[in-house]
Image (tube, helix red, strand yellow):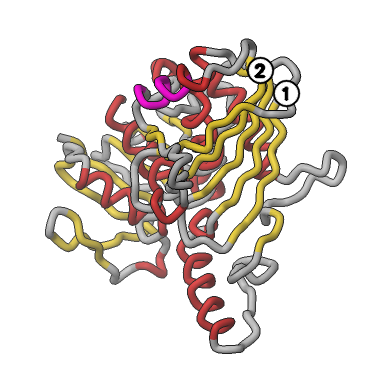
Amino acid sequence: MKHVAIVGATGAVGQEMIRVLEQRKFPVSTLTLLASKRSLGKSMTFQGKQVPVQELTHDSFAGVNVALFSAGATTTKQFAPSAVKAGAIVVDNSSAFRMDPGTPLVIPEINPEDLKSHKGIIANPNCCAIILLMAVYPIHKINPIKRIIVSTYQSASGAGAKAMEELRLQAADVLAGKAPVPSVFQFPIAFNVFSHNAAMDPETGYNGEELKVIEESHKILHNDIPISPTCIRVSTMRAHAESVHLELTNPVDLDAIRRAIENSPGVRLQDDRKTNHFPMPLEASGQDDVIVGRLRRDIASKDGREMDLFCCGDQLLKGAALNAVQIAEIV
């Protein structure tokens, strides 16, 4: 039985971490919920009991075995060393240590062996990188990928609980004939689509979210496959979608690819051409699996080695909380 702490417990991902720990019957002896001072007085339900939220300090980790962090890179850099010093293993959902050479960046279904090298901190990858790699890794194992082009359609949940509430409020305003007023995002999110709100690199024209997908995928796969992402915010509440184009080493064998996806943990094939039923954010929301479908050969490919697919995954679950808890289960 483990003493588990959740840092950022009142946020969207923190709340999912509590639920996933209970759902997966993680061996929790004591659950400590940590957040900023403004969350004092709140409590959250775990295993039918109310657990009070405590203020995060450097002394919060006495006796803690596993600390799940989901409070942003600044908070992780400030407090994760204190957790490790107290004897805890940190699984961090922020970007703070993802590209640190000494920190494993892990998707359990893909590179669990990297966990052996951890020094107290393990990084949880970017949500879009997780969803992308979960969808394409079964293909990569049977027909190595030479190039990836991906367009993401990212829900409000990717920006946290406040962004989800902003979408709710703006949708109500628009339907009532009022002008939506953005605060979390630069632009209105309700009934709108815009380039991801991460900072833009003026030289390359790629934003920070897109660069994360590239760099983190390379680290997880231990392979510098050329990747070109376009990351977009859309007005769905939760679950990200991605349109993926692949160039493979050998000609596309759709039957073999379907079998590979069906036999891979953490993914589910939804590829019904007869009924036009393919992955959708509504069906991916609240689900552990990444849903993959719309499999097809690229009809413009001259040598038959290119294909396209569409996938959806719950950003708060496999893209964040679930992946973190799976890492904790292994270590």
* Res 63 quadrant in image: top left
Q: Is residue 205 above or below residue 112?
A: below
Q: Which mark is residue 301?
A: 1
Q: Which residues are magenta?
A: 257-263
* Res 183 quadrant in image: bottom right
Residue 135, horizontal then vertical, whole percent: 49, 31
Residue 274, horizontal then vertical, whole percent: 45, 42
Residue 163, horizontal then vertical, whole percent: 53, 65
* Image quadrant occupied by the N terminus: top left
**Residue 275 as seen in the image, left or right of residue 227:** left
* Prevailing secondary structure class for the magenta stretch in the rendered image: helix
Q: Kindly identify the amino acid type of the residue bearing the numbered disc 2.
A: Arg
Dot 2 corresponds to which residue? Answer: 305
Residue 306, horizontal then vertical, whole percent: 66, 23
Q: Tell me what residue is drawn at x 25 percent, y 62 percent.
A: 44
Label 2 neighbourhood size at 10 Å, few (<14), some (14-19), many (20+)? some
* Image quadrant occupied by the C terminus: top left
Q: Look at the image and say whether residue 258 sits in the magenta stretch.
A: yes
